[in-house]
Amino acid sequence: MGMTDLPGRRLLLVHAHPDDESINNGATMARYAAEGAQVTLVTCTLGEEGEVIPPSLAHLAPGEGSAGAFSPLGAHREGELAAAMEELGVTDHRLLGGRGRFKDSGMMGLPQNDREDAFWGADVDGAAAYLVEVIRSVRPQVLVTYDPDGGYGHPDHIQAHRVATRAAELAADGDFRPGLGVPHTIAKIYWNRVARSAAEEGFARLRASGIAFDGVADIGDVPGVVDDAEITAEIDGTAYAARKAGAMRAHVTQIAVDGAFFALSNGLGQPLFSTEHYQLARGASGADPGVRETDLFAGVGV
């Protein structure tokens, strides 16, 4: 696709593993895709170290050497990701550096963090160069990724933040790898967030619903929950809630969905948010001071 063929609005999302995108941004992605925006997802690993929920798929669970050249779970999750993107109407989804370039690092402090091919240990500029090529190709006005803590401290989420932020800087630098394309400056960078009031309301609904999980998660278990004052953008994806739920169901090894709620491998219920929140980390807000944006492209020339 040449620069003259690009849609007017272009959104890039950078996530650590398959399923992160659907949980955090599924309604946003479905809404913008339906409205004709270019939505590009870059996933940094195949989540080879994820736990497996359904007993029927237990044979995919990571074991010795699971993050090597071939990972049954990684291959399966790649298929889940493709199915989730079909649910959301997103046709441009890529793996950072190509399939198998970077491997899931596991949770913080595990031996997997130190593997040679773990994403956590990748050279940031080297990994960012792969993303620079994507940025200069699709030329997004808006980038969505994690905060510096990765939302909850997972090493791959932290690294995804570092790589995405560095790639945005390098993509705009005409002296950096000119062979990767014409420099491009991303106008706005957002971090994934959840408004505390929305989390409290969602957990109250879950407790009142009677839906049986193994228990109910704590608000502190939800990545990215912050005080309402830190939220700068609120995307109403109510019309796309079913698509988000469908995308989450596609990640069957990782997520169990029940109506407007879901659980991860710990079996603890959480609310499924159809309104998604963001914090503007770089760029100018398109809303009046103190008012939340309702469009990530607000104030961006198209």
Image (cartoon, rainbow, N blue to C red):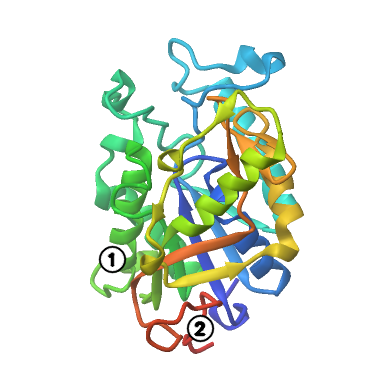
Image quarter where the N terminus lies is bottom right
Q: Nearer the viewer, residue 237 or 40?
A: 237
Q: Is residue 267 above or below residue 191?
A: above
Q: Secondary structure at mark 1?
A: helix
Mark 1–mark 2 CB contact (< 8 Å): no
Residue 8: image location, x then y, percent: 59, 82
The amino acid at mark 2 is Ala
Q: Which mark is residue 25?
A: none
Q: Nearer the viewer, residue 71 or 210?
A: 210
Residue displayed at 31% across by 21% down: 110
> Is residue 153 in view?
yes
Residue displayed at 29% across by 64% down: 177
Mark 1 lies on residue: 170
Residue 159: image location, x then y, percent: 32, 45
Local crowd size for mark 2, using a 10 Å CA cut-off: few (<14), some (14–19), many (≥20): some
Using residue 131 as the reference point, say whether residue 62 is left or right of it: right
Compare marks 1 and 2 and give the one earlier in the sequence: 1
Mark 2 lies on residue: 298
* Separation of marks 1 and 2 at Cα, in angstroms: 24 Å
The amino acid at mark 1 is Leu
Residue 103: image location, x then y, percent: 41, 32
Q: Is residue 289 above or below residue 81?
A: below
Q: Secondary structure at mark 2?
A: loop
Q: Is residue 153 above or below residue 73?
A: below
Using residue 160 as the reference point, say whether residue 216 is left or right of it: right
